[in-house]
Image (tube, grey):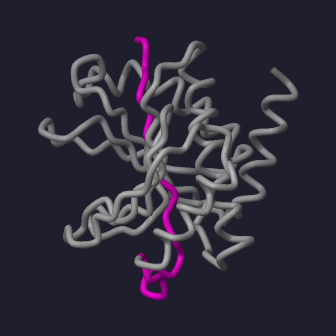
Amino acid sequence: MNVQHINFKLFIENPETVNLADYSAIFNSWIQKHTLEELLIDVADYLHVHNGPGILLIGHQADYSLDNRAGRLGLLYNRKSQLEGTTQEKLAQAARAVLTAAQIFEKENGLDFNGSEVQIIINDRLLVPNTAETLASLEPDLKAFFDKLYDGAEYVLMHQTDPRERFTVNVKAESSFEVAALLENLSVEAAHA
């Protein structure tokens, strides 16, 4: 299965303390400073949408957003352009991108992310339908990836089965993980590849 368009969401610890309106200017500064690897183009404000995409940083290859869908505020990475490589390599790329952005937010803006809980969405209903068969096909790659990301710690994969939704898996580790530790686990993985 050629998995593309991976979304990776990392949840914010204390969402009630975050004023999303402040982050439009921050995302604009990321464009000006070339803060991230991708080509960043514009910022869109969706604060008027209840439980919506929040503040969106639009890029050529990918978008980043402080996303509040389903009432859960987090940093969402949405890969738009296709990548070569294995499913695990594509998951690692998306995870590295969102964790790098999260680390910048932690250092520069005082946000705190819960590395123990993430959400993976495949934004391609045609190639990756939200079915039990898709889960069976992707589960070995998902488990191998999260075994590395969580450095062997116990975690639970929960597939959201609503066929009207995109393929979505929520992952919750039983241990606590900081963003820096997850980035380190990805670096160790890359060094051994």
| Residue 144 x, y percent position in the rendering | 61, 29
| Residue 31 x, y percent position in the rendering | 59, 53
Please give the range of residues in magenta: 1-20
| Residue 175 x, y percent position in the rendering | 65, 63
Q: Nearer the viewer, residue 180 or 17?
A: 17
- Residue depicted at 20% across the width and 67% down the height: 49
| Residue 188 x, y percent position in the rendering | 84, 37
In the depicted structure, whether residue 115 falls above or below residue 6:
below
Q: Nearer the viewer, residue 18 or 155?
A: 18
Considering every residue shown, the one lying at the far left of the view is: 164
Q: Nearer the viewer, residue 189 or 143?
A: 189
Q: Say how many tags the image has.
A: 0
Q: Is residue 59 magenta?
A: no
In the depicted structure, whether residue 74 falls above or below residue 118:
below
- Residue depicted at 44% across the width and 83% down the height: 19
- Residue depicted at 28% across the width and 64% down the height: 46
- Residue depicted at 48% across the width and 34% down the height: 60
Left or right of 158? Residue 50 is left
Q: Quadrant of the C terminus?
A: top right
Q: Residue 169 falls in which quadrant of the image?
A: top left
Q: Is residue 18 magenta?
A: yes
Q: Quadrant of the N terminus?
A: top left
In the depicted structure, whether residue 89 falls above or below residue 71:
above
In the depicted structure, whether residue 5 falls above or below residue 20:
above
Q: Residue 106 falls in which quadrant of the image?
A: bottom right
Left or right of 37? Residue 8 is left
Considering every residue shown, the one lying at the far right of the view is: 191
Left or right of 96? Residue 68 is left
